[in-house]
Image: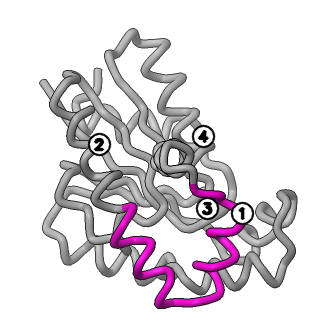
């Protein structure tokens, strides 16, 4: 059985943390699963195209039109890569993609897991990285809010789950979702 599960949420919401838990559960249960991180895929595409990420980021995060041009360039390449992975793998495929909803590419997943988090906790998490608070807020403002994502997901007529990572829920929450999705 093949099932594609999209994991989405805003920056700092805890997507990577959640994916780590799903990986651990799949490994413990010897479940055949692959995990695709769209940020890694994007970096690899840019590297192959010899595009300087730092210069690109300055350009696209400061100009909405440049962001549109960039997305028009990168999203078809990401989709193509993901489709090739979906077509050549069986079992469970988890796709971690912060902008799954914003990029209107939910059609490639069967189920969506929305990682939700209180905004002040997101910002605190992100401040531990290399971006300053002003840059963090600017980038968060380019994404849908968690509430907006949830509303859009509800309109998609797809199975979805919400995990609130504000208080770091226990592993049981993740196991329950996998069981409902028949990832056994």
Disc with the residue nearer the chain's start (4 vs 1): 1
Quadrant of residue 92 within the rendered picture: top left
User: Any mark on residue 13, and which?
Assistant: 3
Which structural element holds mark 2?
helix
Q: Say if 163 sits above or below 21 in the image.
A: below
* 3D distance between C-alphas at marks 2 and 1: 24 Å
Picture quadrant where residue 129 is located: bottom right
Disc assigned to residue 54: 1
Q: Nearer the viewer, residue 46 or 29?
A: 46
Please tell me which residue is depicted at 77% across the width and 64% down the height of the picture.
126
Q: What stretch is highlighted in magenta?
A: 51-74
Q: Where is residue 38 in the image (x, y as percent from the top left)?
A: 45, 48
Above or below for 40 versus 140: above
Q: How far apart are marks 2 and 3 (CA)?
A: 23 Å
Mark 4 highlights which residue?
A: 170
Residue 68 in the magenta stretch? The answer is: yes
- Tell me which numbered mark, 3 or 4, is placed earlier along the sequence: 3
Is residue 22 covered in magenta? no
**Apparent side of residue 131 relative to residue 39 in the rendered image (left or right):** right
Q: In which quarter of the image is the N terminus?
A: top left
């Amino acid at each position: 059985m093949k099932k594609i599960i999209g994991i989405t949420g805003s920056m700092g919401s805890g997507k990577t943390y959640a994916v780590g838990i799903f990986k651990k559960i799949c490994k413990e249960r010897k479940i055949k699963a692959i995990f695709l991180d769209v940020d890694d895929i994007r970096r690899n595409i840019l590297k192959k195209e010899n595009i300087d990420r730092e210069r690109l980021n300055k350009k696209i995060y400061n100009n909405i039109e440049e962001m549109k041009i960039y997305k028009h360039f990168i999203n078809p390449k990401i989709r193509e890569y993901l489709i090739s992975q979906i077509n050549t793998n069986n079992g469970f495929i988890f796709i971690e993609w912060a902008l799954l909803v914003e990029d209107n590419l939910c059609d490639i997943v069967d189920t969506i897991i929305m990682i939700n988090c209180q905004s002040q906790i997101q910002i605190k998490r992100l401040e531990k990285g290399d971006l300053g608070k002003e840059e963090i807020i600017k980038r968060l403002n380019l994404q849908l809010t968690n509430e907006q994502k949830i509303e859009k997901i509800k309109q998609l007529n797809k199975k979805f789950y919400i995990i609130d990572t504000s208080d770091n829920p226990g592993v049981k929450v993740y196991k329950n979702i996998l069981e409902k999705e028949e990832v056994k």
